[in-house]
Each structure stands twice: as C-alpha cells, then as structure tokens.
Amino acid sequence: MVMATSSAGDVFDNSRRYLDQTKIQSALGMASELGASYAEVRLVAITDSSVATRDGQLERAIPGQEVGATMRILADGAWGVHSTTDISSIPSQVESTVRLAKAVAKRRGINDKPVSLAEVPIIEDSVHWSPKKDVRNTELDEKLHHLKVLYENSKDDKKIASVICGWHDEHIHTEFLSSEGMNRSWSFQRSLINATVTARDGSDVVSYRTRHGGEGGLELIESCDLGQLGSNAMTSAIRLLKAERSPSGKMPLVADRDLTGVYIHEALGHPCEADLVAAGDSCLDGKLGQKIGNEIVTVVDDPTIRTGYGAHPIDDEGLDTKEKCLIKNGVLTEYLNHRETAHHFDLVPNAGARAQDGLHHPLVRMSNTLIRGGNHRDLDELVEDIEYGVYACGSRGGQVDTGRGSFQFAAQEAWLIENGELTNPLKDVSVSGLTLQILKDVDGLTTDSRLAAPGFCGKGQTVPVGDGGPIMRIKEALVG
Amino acid sequence: MLPDDALERLIDGSKKIGDLCKKNNVQQWEILALQSYGHELDIEAGKISLAAGGGDGGYGIRVVENGRYGYAHLVDINSAEYAINQAQSIAKVSPSIEGFSLPSNQPTDGVDGLFDKRILSLGPEDLLQQADSILSEVSSIDERAIVTGGGVGVSATAGVLLSSEGIEHHGITTSHGVGVQVSIDEDDQLTSSWQGESSKQLLTPVPDCIKSSVEWAQKTRDPISIDSGAEDLPVLMTSEGLAPLFSVVVPSAIRGERLARLESFWSGREGKNVMAKDLSLIDDARKTGAKASSSRDAEGVPTRRQVIVESGTLVGSLWSTRDSAKLVGEGKIDHAESTGSASRGGHQSPPMTSCSNLELVSSSKSNTQDQLLERMDTGYIVNSVMGAHTANPTSGDFSVTTSSILRVEDGDIVGAIKQAGLSGNMAKSLQKDVFLGDNIRVSGGSMYLSDVLFMQGLRVNPA
C-alpha cells in the first residue's frame, strides 16, 4: 500500500520531522554506492483548507492533510525519479531508481551533454516564515465571516444572478536531504479569498472574478477591504452586461497592473525559464546580454516579496531564494535557472526550482514576477495622446508558445480609448503578440509598480504565482 | 506495476474508516479510496531527459447528517478519526438540504474496456523502447523535426467506494498516454505542434498523433501574408483545435444546477432549439473503453448514456444527488434526480456534477475533409489554439490566438499564416450551418469530436 503512515494522526507542525533522517541518509549513501553522483529526498506535508459559499450559504468546506516525497537520483549523467505517498518505502526504491537513471543515460547520444549540477553552498538549518495569524488556528466560522462580507457587498443589484465565494489556505512544510549533506526544512503559509459574480440581463449572462491573497496567514485576508473588493466585482459584472464586443486589429493597448503582470509572466517569464531554453523551446535562446526590449523595461522575479502569492523562502533544490533581474533597461540579463541548467549554461544558480508538491520533481519556475515602474504619472497621462486604442483590465489568464515567442492573454473588462479618453466598456478582449516585438513596443509605464491579484501557473505542474507591475502602454498590439 | 494486493488493502483501509464512522455514530458516510501507480518518461530537446515512477493515493470521507454534509481528505489512515471529526463538525454548520441523502445501492452492469492487463506488465524499459520508437519515427518523417517536449506514461489506479448505504464498488483501471511537441527550427523559422493521445487500452508503439504533430509543424512553415484585417469567415476546427474550447464552454452549460440558476447560456432554453437541427450532444459514461467511462459515478449511482441535445433541441442536463436535492429544495426546479453524473478530481474532492464522455454527432451525412473544404470555399483551418482556458463558460464568448492556422481559398489550402486571433461565441456558432467531419477523435480530455466546419459566427484576425 503506497500510503503514508505515522504514529499519530495529528496536524502537521513545524517542530516535527517526517523523514527518518537516519534511514534517508543511509538511502542516499546507498545511492552513491550504486554509482549515483547525486541523490536527494524532498518531502512536502501540506495542511490545507478550502471553503466555498454560494449566495452566502456554505457550499462546501474541505480540510485536508497530504504528504508526499520525491527522490531524485542522478547517475551516469541522467535522472531517475521516484515519488510516493508511502514515505517509509523510499529506501527500498533506491536501487530501482538508480537503475532507471542509468537506463536513461544509456540512450544519450554522443552529442548530448550528460546532466551535471552547478555547485551550491551546503546548508543545514530550518527556516520558518511564520505568519502573524496561523491559518491552522482559524476556525471555519471566521472564514465564513470574511466570505460573508465579500458576498454581502457583491450581491446588491437585481441583475446579480449569483455570487460564489471561495477561500483557500495552506501550510506548507518541506524537508530536504541530499547526498551532498544538505539538510534543510522550511515552512510558510498561503491564504487566498475570491469571488465570482454572475450577472444576467435577459439572455445575456456575464461573470467577473476577483481575488486577494498571498504568502501569509489570516492577517492577509484581514488586511483587505473585502467590502470594496466585492463591490468592485459587482460593479464590473453589471458593466460587462452593457459592454460591447471588442474591436479587432492592431492598436495601442494600455494594461492595468493585473494584465501587465500576466503579460510579463507569459511573454517574458516563460521564455526566460532555462529548462525551456536548454530544450530548444525558447525564443530567448542565445539572447543573454542582448537588448530585447525598450530601455524603460526592467523585469524582476522575486520570491522574497513576502506578500506575493509566489513567495517562498527556499527553492525545491534547497537554495535560498533571491531576486532575479531578468531584464535591466531592455537588456536580457538573466535566465531563471535550477542547478542543472545553471551548469548547462555556466551560470550562477539563482534558486528557480519549484515543484507543485511532494509528488512532483522540480522544474524551473517563476515566483513573483513584475515590471518595475517608469516615469508616467498615472493612467490619464498614458492615454492622453492615444487617438484610438483599448484600456484592458483584470486577467482571465494567458498562454505562451515559448519556442515561437507568441503569447495570448485575456482581460476581464476593458474600455475603448478615443481621443485620449476612456469611452465605451468592452468585453472579451484578448491580446496576442510576439515576445521579441512587443517588449520593444512598451512605451509607457506609470511610476507605481506592485504585485496584483494572485494567480496560478501551469507547466505540467501548477504552482501559485504573483504577477504585477505598473500600468503599461504598448504602442501596438493585436487586440481581438 | 500494481501490487497484487493493492485493491484488497484499499478495501481493508476503507472498511476501517467505515468502522470508525460507525463508532462515531455518523448517520451516513461514504469513503473513496484511490491508489495509483505508474511510470513516465519526459522527452526534451530530442532525447529522453528523465524517467520517473511511483505511486500516490489517499482517502476522501463524506458524511451526511440530516441533509447536511461535510468532507475531509487524508493520506495517513491514522488520521482517519481526526478527519471524520472534521467532516462532522463541518456538516453541523452546513445548510440542511431537504431530501438530500447518500444514494442507495442500485444494480448496474459493468463497462468494458477500462482495464488492459497488458499495461500492468509494462515497465520502464518498455516505455524507454516506446520513446526510442517515437523519436526515431519523428526523424524518419522529417530529419529537421525534433521532439522538444512531451513524454510517455502508463498508470494503473485501484479505486474503492464504500458507503453506509450498501455501496461497495471497486475496480482497477489503466491508462496509457503519449504527447509530443514537435518543432522544426530552420532558416530562422521555428514551427511546432503539440499532439497527444491517451487511452485506457494499450496504445500502439507509435500512435497516429506523432505523424500528425510532425505534419502540422511542416504545414505551418513559410507563412503567407494576409492583409485583409479581421474577417468573419468559415472556420474548420480540427478535433484537436476545437476540443480545448469546447471542453471549457459546453460541459458547464449542461450542468443542471447552472441551467436552473440561470448561469448557463442555455438557461431557459429547455425544450427549445439550441443547436443546428441535425446536431445532437450526448454524454455517454458507458462508452466502451472511453476515457471517462465507469459503471458507477463518483458517488456510486449507476451511470447512463444521456442525450443532452437531440436534433438541435435541449432535452437533458446533468445532475448529481446533492445538486438535484438542493435545487428542488430551493424551488429553482420542480423535479430533478441524479443522472449518475457525479465525478471527482481525486480523493481530495467531494463529488461534483460533471460530464463524462461528451459526443457531438450529426444526423446528416458526415463529410471528408475535402468535402468540408469545398463547402467552406474561402476560410481557415485551425488545429490548435492558445488561451482556450480564457474562454468565458458563462457567456460562451472566446477570443484566442492560433499559430496552427491554414488559409483556404476556393476550397484549396493556399498556405499557413504565422499568427491570428480567433474569436466568437460557441453557443451562437453551433446554432446553424455546422458541418461535421467523418473522423471522430477523443481530444481535450474526454471530448469526442470530429473536425467541425463552422460556416458562421467566427472572426479571424491575422497578425
């Protein structure tokens, strides 16, 4: 049976270690004896809770406790991986996982480089980002109170057909041991509240989604004006009922910080992931040090911004996280990397490895990605000299083809810009373009850059991310 | 792959949790236990980059007391009593739904083709050989083509559903999947295509999707320029291009709850025409060997073949036990009962109403691609879209981007275009002048769609 067993059925906590250190160290040693050049075991224990209400009534509340571990073994320059919820079975899987890695290595072509890892400091410690108010101590009644505030402020119009509110919190505890002697544990929490407001007028139905959240506990939710969040969502949903279909064609685009964040995440962030670059699937291959954007564009990815939904203290290869400057004044300065790609490209490791949970192996991922602020005072200044264009707000998500460098993102609502003024509301606006063109076409940024609403990023595995920036103007984008 | 006693141990674990529920005087309880094992290979940059294996699983516990329900999930069976207490305390603060109780045990027949013994015996070396065959096939079709991403995987899942109402359902299903992103990067021009295939049964060593992926990477090279600006023209969506959009928009529109709450673009259209008169939409959870088939749904109700749209008229909708009781209790609908349409994302999710294998069929004669192109005259073929998940399931509106698009003039393909926006409304596009191809394929999870020619309602905006 591949399921975890423990001596007690208690809630996961920081003081407890779930991996039997002696047995795991012995397993890692065995991997080395069998010919592995590197081995690691990473365990993640998650205590989480999801709550949903519909029109103010509890729809479902789901508390859960999950634990999983992944063993990665590098042998003969290739990876073998074993993931399991049966933590005690890990030592018994060492031999087969080494064999797996060696079988992959045998298929390597003569021109293919064997996998090697960049050297990193070996650290033994525990790092815990403690929230001010631990979500594990938050009662369901209190969560329902906050959801009710959000609901009450988003329903007050006869055209509102329904309001679905959601809550998710999680405490993430990770343990990491490697054959190099790394022995770390870390923990942090994330909290999120959201609402989807549906409005109806005759046969027209629209919906608007709003979210607030980040790394931290209950204090994150308490710090948000949920009444305003709900009221804004309701106003937007009602406005969408009257909105016109978006014009199509190439035109100037102004994006709020939500969309700016999604744009930079999709258009630049993904092509900057060094595993995609190494796989030949990035339009930024070979462009380090080259100017790829307007000089007003500076982009960072920073997991240490504690309020961001993508914040985490240590990456999933055991490295301390830090800010990465991807573009400095239009010049591509850094790829996001993990130890394998850092070695592949002869770069300094920058702690970009993230895994969805304990059952997945780490990939190169973003965390909190944002464009730095520019020189424009505000939205008015950005739109004043646009004759005909679109101001797009709120994100419905996006996608990128990193190899071709083409991307798409969709707005929740938008306005037409006519002669420097916002005029008619628009709906179903999407924007597409080519990364290497559109970074050059960013020609205006307001001064205030900050993270926008929390989001999720999929790359085979789903991880929480934060995106944002200032309000941004692109002189020509394909709007549809 | 799967230990011989995996199912027995799951049954044993479920019974232990059931006994704890009885000990805690839970009125009604339901235990879902799942355990998956599998192997997978990742392919990057034309080579196998990683081999992985393992297993995961857990338990989900639903309790119902006086029409109120609570849920909790766990991995460690020693936490079961704690989880039961959590679920009970949640049930106490949940609203009571009149008439809601867990389903009783009703007889049903099995569905064939959900388990393939050959998959169970596959090991990592078999997958390595399959990956070798795929890589070799790609370069034999076009020596410029490289598999830049994707992989091969097999899994087996043992599942148990045990309830206080006498349901004891268990079984093993298997799965085999292949997906590849093929790129051709030559002369400063990179084209690529993603295609995948998965089945409950063993796939052939080199499934058809491999050849198709190379062909689309080839077909989209040397793009032509179209200066027309945005045009409302006929669009032939291949099954692979349509399924991601279709799966975002249509399944939520046919959920009974959304229809009754006026949250579906088909709300209020029951008994009325919603699609072209030759089209029917069927949710068939009993389709032999299909991706989302099962003999019982996620709460143990026997599944069925459910006609949703018949000859263009909306005649059905999907319900789970709780949704039907709730909406009747709220007075939103006079009568509803489970259609065996509850599903779950895993042991972490309580049952939710969802479609199974959704098929779009036509009573008219199906068309070859040549016939569809002749009917189209001038328009586009779209084989994949970016941003399907941004489609609006409430309104049916979508605005996506495609780099796998071919221009058709006078019934002939005249070339690819580099990138284009594609927008429209799925509900409106399905209302008239829709023509289906002759080759139904499963795409986008469990959407059984042929190539579909939309003669109206779509706008193409070449970059």
Image: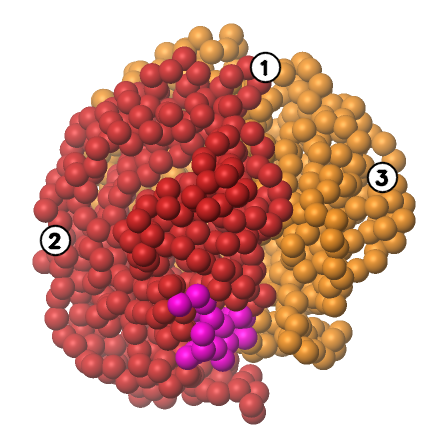
Residue nearer the viewer, A355 or A14: A355
**Residue A333 percent across, percent down from the top left:** 37, 75
Residue nearer the viewer, B388 or B260: B388
The residue sitting at 57% across, 71% down in the picture is B148
For label 3, the residue is B366
**Residue A248 percent across, percent down from the top left:** 62, 42
Mark number, residue A130: 2
- Does residue B280 appear to the left or right of A137 in the view shown? right
Check the residue under mark 2 and report the chain it is in. Answer: A
For chain A, the rendered hue is red
Residue type for callout 1: Gly
- Does residue A370 appear to the left or right of B53 in the view shown? left
Asked if one can make out residue B115 in the rendered structure from this viewpoint, the answer is no
For label 1, the residue is B268
Q: How far apart are marks 2 and 3 (CA)?
A: 62 Å
**Residue B425 percent across, percent down from the top left:** 63, 33
Q: Label 3: few (<14), some or many (≥20) within 10 Å? A: some
> What range is drawn magenta here?
A272-295
Residue nearer the viewer, B183 or B223: B223
Instruction: Provide the major secondary structure of the magenta segment.
Output: loop
